[in-house]
Amino acid sequence: MSSFRHPGTVLTDHVLTVPLDHDDPAGETIDIFARAVVTPDNAAKPWLLFLQGGPGSASPRPIGRDSWVGRALDDYRVLLLDQRGTGRSTRVSRHSVTRRGTPEAQAEYLSHFRADSIVRDAELLRRSMLGDERWTVLGQSFGGFCAVNYLSFAPEGLREVLITGGLPGLDARAEDVYRATYPRVAARNEAHYARYPGDVALVRDICAFLRDHDVRLPDGARLTVESFQTLGIAFGSSTGSHELHYLFESAFESPGVLSDAFLAQVQARVGFASTPIFPLLHEACYGQQNATAWAAQRLRAEHPEFDSSDVVYFTGEMTYPWQFDVDPALTPLREAAHVLAARDTWPRLYDRAQLAANEVPVVAAVYYEDMYVDRTLSLATAAAIKGARTWITNEFEHDALRVSSRAILDRLIAMARGDA
């Protein structure tokens, strides 16, 4: 362990070696990294484990008491876990995966980076740090999916569970998720163009240019119309529509010339060099004894508005097989991605019987207009978890924990204590 100080906080690094496959504890191992954040006066407070959204994103790197961490430190000591494959935990990258050999061997390796493995890592970490003491879990988005898996298979480690925008459908397949998601994304496109009507023609012009030219991003990736459309993932955040408008208006440096600044910003938004787990395993988040088979690509055919050249609709939190053809960080993983999409032996992620008998306090913020996580599926799951309480709100977007952390945590902590 090593420690360092920020203004008002002490941060301590923890590394734990765990099995790659928890069902084979004597086999290959990987390292899990977590960072404890405490204040000088909260050494006796309970622990809160943060499970990050994603999949494939590292935990936050706070400076002092910034963001939601500062509010959480009023009531807890905070542990920021880099989920396996991210941050300083054993990384998943095109380099680490291709070293595994065949696409089948690569896919087998990647199959151990879902929520079920993350939760088993967390339990080993809890026992290593706390012994029999329970901790609180805060799950944001995909982290909420992990929290429900935790409730299903290791509730003995949980003191309480707080979830923000992350109650999964217990039985929903990827097809169900995207069938619900595409219309919401279409509505966000319509809202954007109503707010910024000039963007209709501007975006159409950008797409026409992309169709007629071989446009390359700074990393060498080809910018196609389809990859440009994936910018729409931003529509689900509180400021995403405005950010994209500013991006579009800077597209052309001069007639027929896309600006370098525009291309650099697009690369930062559509590339997966830092988060390859997201396109590799995003659909696998919904795999339970079934193949996902590129569900978002298949369901797109039911929504022809996303392939119109008149009014260009942007897509949302979907991943597509062609992304592995155009992104240099993904092309070496193309065949493994197809093997994963065909995999039909994913274990179940949730235990309805255990959730129905749940004794852990569970509270969840459900964002009424959440573009990423379907409200109907979330509320059905809340109803299936004994004692779960929901706060259904249209005041916030999916990124509320980041932009409105005090309001969100004040409400959820009060609910968990029965004060709201």
Image (tube, rainbow, N blue to C red):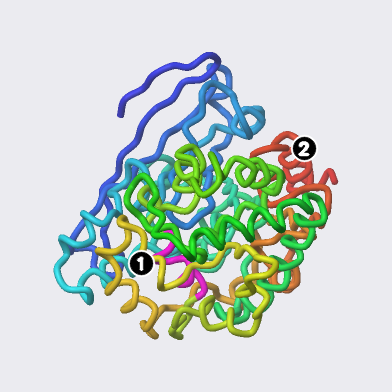
Q: Identify which amino acid the numbered label 2 is placed on.
A: Ala
In this image, 180 relative to 36: left or right? right
Q: Identify which amino acid the numbered label 1 is placed on.
A: Phe
- Picture residue at 53% right of the left edge, 83% below the top: 298
Q: CA distance from mark 1 to mark 2?
A: 40 Å
Looking at the image, is 156 positioned above or below residue 104?
Answer: above
In this image, 386 relative to 285: left or right? right
Quadrant containing the N terminus in the rendered view: top left
Asked where in the image residue 389 lies, by quadrant, the reply is bottom right
Q: Residue furthest top?
A: 7
Total marks placed: 2
Looking at the image, is 5 positioned above or below residue 235?
Answer: above
Q: Which residue is mark 2?
A: 407
Q: Which residue is mark 1?
A: 324
- Picture residue at 52% right of the left edge, 58% below the top: 209
Q: Position of residue 155 (x, y in %)?
A: 54, 60
- Picture residue at 32% right of the left edge, 51% below the top: 220
- Picture residue at 39% right of the left edge, 49% below the top: 217
Report the magenta residues as a range.
Answer: 278-286
Label 1 vs label 2, nearer the camera:
1
Asked where in the image residue 142 lies, by quadrant, the reply is bottom right
Residue 313 numbered tag:
none
Asked whether the residues under the numbered discs 1 and 2 touch, taking CB atoms below 8 Å apart as contact, a structural biologist would say no
User: Principal SS element in the magenta part?
Assistant: helix
Q: Position of residue 405 (x, y in %)?
A: 69, 37
Front in this rendered view, residue 104 or 203: 203
Q: Is residue 167 magenta?
A: no
Front in this rendered view, residue 249 or 253: 253
Q: Residue furthest front?
A: 255
Going from N to C along the chain, the mark reached first, 1 or 2, is: 1
